[in-house]
Image (cartoon, coloured by chain):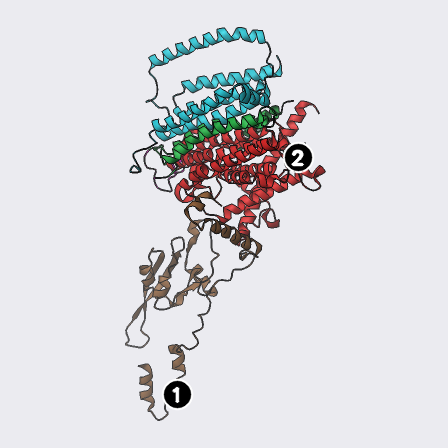
Chain colours: A green, B red, C cyan, D brown
Amino acid sequence: MSPYVVVAAVVLAGVLLFAAAMGARRVLAPAAPTRAKLATYESGVDPVGRDWAQTQVRYLVYAFLYVIFAVDAVYLFPWALVLRSPHLGAASLVEIAVFIGIVVVGLAHAARRGLLRWH
Amino acid sequence: MSPAVEVLVRTVAVLAAFLVLPLLVGQTEHKVMAHMQGRLGPMYAGGFHGWAQLVADGVKFAQKEDVTPAAADRPVFRLAPAVGLVPYLVALAAVPLSPGLVGADAPASAVLVLAATAVGILGTLMAGWASANKYSLLGAMRAAAQLLSYELPLVLAVASVCLAAGSLSLTAIAGAWSPWWLLWQLPGAFVFLVAAVAELQRPPFDMPVADSELVFGAYTEYTGLRFAFFLLAEYAGIVLMSLLFAVLYLGGWKGPLSGDLGWLWTLLKGFVVSVLVIWMRVAWPRLREDQLQRLAWLGLVPLALLQLALTGVWVVATA
Amino acid sequence: MTGLDVAFAAAGTVAAASAVLSVTTRHVVHAALWLVVSLGAVAGCYLVLGAEFVALVQVLIYVGAVVVLVLFALMLTRAPIGPNEEVSASPLHRALAAVLAAGVTALLAAVLVPLARVVGAVRRGGPGTTGLGEQLFGTWVWPFEALSVLLLAALVAALAVAGMARGRGAGEP
Amino acid sequence: MTEAAKGSRAAGIPGLVRGLAATARTLARPTHTSEYPDAPPSLPPRSRGVIALLAENCTSCMLCARECPDWCIYIDSHKETVPATTPGGRDRQRNVLDRFAIDFSLCMYCGICVEVCPFDALFWSPEFEYAELDIRELLHERDRLGQWMATVPPPPALDERSADPAEVSALGKPARAPRAPRQAAAEEGQA
């Protein structure tokens, strides 16, 4: 039997747990909404403006970097399985070094442009 | 045992561990943190030293009104706690306590754990955006940026261990472990520990929920049981990361008398790591947002890459 | 029908249905979240076919990184709650897109459905993760190395296009 | 242990280690928590718990109510005529207190009322266990305020070398010389 059947069952169990807890809440918890209670909480002051506001775009840099490096990093896992093979081991070490080295240039570029520094 | 019964038993066991271990860690945190601050912590619920405090908290949370703000995006807001919680449950299922004692012994369980924790980010992002609260949105942004930034060192550190063991299975990794790894994989272990604490958004990496700036970040608008689920996810995360650290870097079930009681060793090592995580929270101040990101990209990532190079060269040289 | 068939059909149905929802919803962020469901279901398809590593990478990269990037971009630029009229296409565009999508679906179905009949029931197989590594580091080394250059180019270009690589100095806020 | 701290300040790592050491040392020591509901707290002298009223001393002069920064003292009184005690004397009027109440949900424990009272009708009591489930119950009326008087501690002892209070020094005065005429001495005593 595949272990992923258990994984699927665990996901199902998690969903059931959430559903059951919400059912219990429905039974146990009171519900007395008032206008003030349903208002957006901005530290006790009346909410200003709309629900959404522009935030700093610099967070996007980290998402960019992560996407690139995550694509990069997943190749390490198959590499882990072939590193000990007699005919591929040493060659794959060089190959992965070149591969990662090239991508690290991107990190250096971002760092040199000051993207990792807060202004 | 028929397959269906086996699946059921395993699932129930994982669910039980998921509901019990976080409570243990939470109670330990109550007590350790209190005594580190010269206090006693909860003393009443349950009688002896307030052992049932978290159970009482759970009962209390279930009876609290669950408010969905009027401006919120209702379906996303209400679903977010589940998205934050279930990934940790899945990840916990893949962590072995001993060679025979594991929920789902997947051949690539190390990657499975990483993939599951990566999905957890979505729960925070959904919560922050759907709350229709600017603080929440900013908190979610910070949280997601932090989780992404620290996910990478985490992946690299785990990859280094996989490399050292020549396998992607956590069971096999702990099986290949020897005390020599304590030195050899030390930089990786350091990177893993720091990145794991950051993944959990625990102090000193709790900028996304910085109370003085963002109220409670992405979770500001949550009340009652949904809020409790986010808390449960945090403590389940501590359990998961501590057990992972124990399995990856401390040899899991290896130790004296580990024949039948190996699982106890894993739990014990994991417990020690979680106490360390709690200790960090008490002792250290919060890092600023830019320090967080610099630490990840200019500190941990290069260190993890060095560890990878070290591991790769050593494996090839000794193969 | 084996259990694998059922699982594959279920995952496939979820993937297709959530994909349709993703392109038809008027809420920008909901579209990205439906995309998560769709990509996750595709990972489920891989898993049923026995490609464990590919499935996990699908989750790790697509759900954990790419969709998060998409959500990031949306939430940082323009993602108010509720249906967004600014990004909604006109009825004409929608009709055209539907026709085009139906055409592509029909084309793909015409090619793939006969193949499915040849293959028969869902079977697990493939080279496995170790085989994947051997292929990657043995046979396909050059494409693999070229990929790193592609990734580097993508990163540099993305930073440049997003206007974040400010070469004009630190004068800007 | 963090890189950022390492880069910015040399004190980074020693500082972090010191943080760990300090918390570990506290962990090893016994706690200094006062277990309040189980053990009574040892309150410092002059603790401000609740304000007690000695209604007999109150002249309804309203000074406390007027000085109160958040207007939490309510006083009602009426005037009564006291008939003259001697034939041909004048009737006198005096204030009679009808209501004296302090709303402790508003009180901010500044103690100004206690300070300004010219007739020592208000006192600080260290009693603090008067929490209520309903905020309206925090409005303590005259009787309740009077009951707190039992908990008011005696005034603190004077400093070692301080001058005696006026009352005490008056008592300690040497007796009058017997030569002086009785009438004059009585007048002197009244002055």
Q: Which residues are magenta?
A: A33-49
Tell me the mark number nearer the camera, choosing from 2 and 1. 2
Q: Quadrant of residue C81?
A: top left
Secondary structure found at label 2: loop
Badge 2 amino acid: Ser
Marking on residue D175? 1
Between B173 and D183, the one nearer to me in the picture: B173
Q: What label does residue D104 carry, if any?
A: none
Mark 1 belongs to which subunit? Answer: D
Would residue D191 be visible to someone looking at this image? yes
Discs 2 and 1 carry the same chain letter: no
Question: Residue D66 at x, y = what percent?
Answer: 31, 60
A3 drawn magenta: no
Q: CA distance from mark 2 to mark 1?
A: 98 Å
The C terminus of chain B: image quadrant: top right
Residue identified by numbered label 2? B98
Instruction: Give the image quarter of residue C71.
Output: top left
Amino acid type for the residue under numbered disc 1: Ala
